[in-house]
Amino acid sequence: MPRNVWVLSAISLVVAVGFGVVVPVLPVFAATFGANELAAGAVVAAFALMRLVAAPLVGRADDRFGHKAVLITGLVVVGVSSALTGTAQGYAQLVVLRGLGGLGSAMFSVAGMTVLLASVDATHRGRAAGMYHGGFLIGAMAGPAVGGLLAGVSLRAPFFFYAGTLAAAALCALGLTPVGAGPTKDAPTLPLRTVARDPRFQAACLSHLSFGWNSNGTRMTLVPLFVAGFLADDPVQAALVAGVVMAVAAGVQMVLTLPGGALVDRVGRRTPMVVGSVVLAVALAAIPWSPSAVVLAVVLSLYAAGSALVGPAQSAAIGDTHGGDRAIAAFTMAGDVGSIAGPLAAGALASTVGYPTAFALGAVLWLASAAAGTRMPRTTA
């Protein structure tokens, strides 16, 4: 793999450690300000809303200032936002300060994916995406457990820890080498209006919307609250238990993501996308019926197995479309739409009609993603 793939994988690992530290704590921290499930979901949605607003501008910034500068700036912005979030004195401050980090996250995400896909050809996209996602997963495995431990000291401590990991990631980014403006090494960039008609682009965007809705929304918002309401006695214990079960699931996904990326390169994008989406739907629907933390860990591990197939497949499919950073920005925006609507809808449903309905709606989205995946061609490019 080219140097940039290794550097980006290292960056993703360091970022994910800090993000994983915050995941089990953020909804519980919001609850200390009197937030219910819907209000806790709004904190998660605020971050995604700023990503959505900023994403269309990132492609222009990439063209003017270069991918590397945009990526590093984005990491710094998220770091500062995280540190300030740790000082929040009320719910409104928490929403605003957490939301500001979404601006930097959009810069990092679009620039990072553009550099990744510009550094490899079609026969290596699945494995490159697997390595990149694998870095996130290694960090995500360690992060929640550390976050649970830090929560025992203070619910604010994880946000300062996250700021430190982002500073380390910005230093890692100095090792990136220049790439071209397009997303791939093997074809010219196509206009977005052309790419939008490609079934691969459509399936990848719907899959990423489902991922944002469920993995970044429903799961991240409701699992800690589900643990707090049914499997734990106090907020600190809930954060610890949620952190441990999420760490176990992340470990499973980490082990399976690299083989999943290799499978995507070997058999094409369609089969992993369809099979993985069905697995995700089944696991998501089963989460609210978990009677113990052990069963919840098993169900989340099944969810992780589906993610290990879908993640590399959707990223590689975007590269196959040859759509440039505009297509990557649109792909990112689809995930952000899900990350905005998902936690709000899931929080509202959980607080009114119950957790099973909230998770079932997310499962329906994954089944829709599986259906869209069947329209993808068997070939990779």
Image (tube, rainbow, N blue to C red):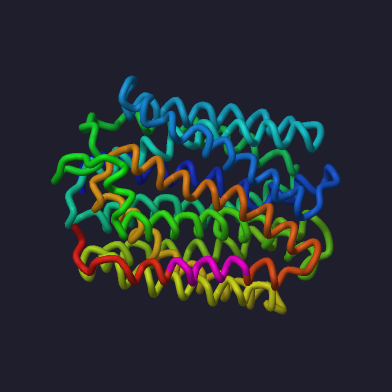
Image x and y of residue 198, in percent: 29, 55
Image x and y of residue 365, in percent: 53, 66
**Vertical side of 207 occupied by 281: above or below:** below
**Vertical side of 140 occupied by 14: above or below:** above
Give the left or right position of residue 320, taking residue 282 as reference.
left
Tell me what residue is drawn at x 68 percent, y 52 percent: 344
**Vertical side of 103 occupied by 215: above or below:** below
Tell me what residue is drawn at x 29 percent, y 32 percent: 176
Image x and y of residue 331, in percent: 40, 47
Tell me what residue is drawn at x 77 percent, y 55 percent: 37
Decide which of 349, 316 is in the foreground and name it.
Answer: 349
Quadrant location of the C terminus in the rendered image: bottom left
User: What segment is highlighted magenta in the picture?
Assistant: 361-369
Q: Main secondary structure of the magenta part?
A: helix
Give the left or right position of residue 127, taking residue 333 as reference.
left
Tell me what residue is drawn at x 16 percent, y 43 percent: 185
Give the left or right position of residue 232, taking residue 47 as reference.
right
Question: Disc count in the image?
Answer: 0
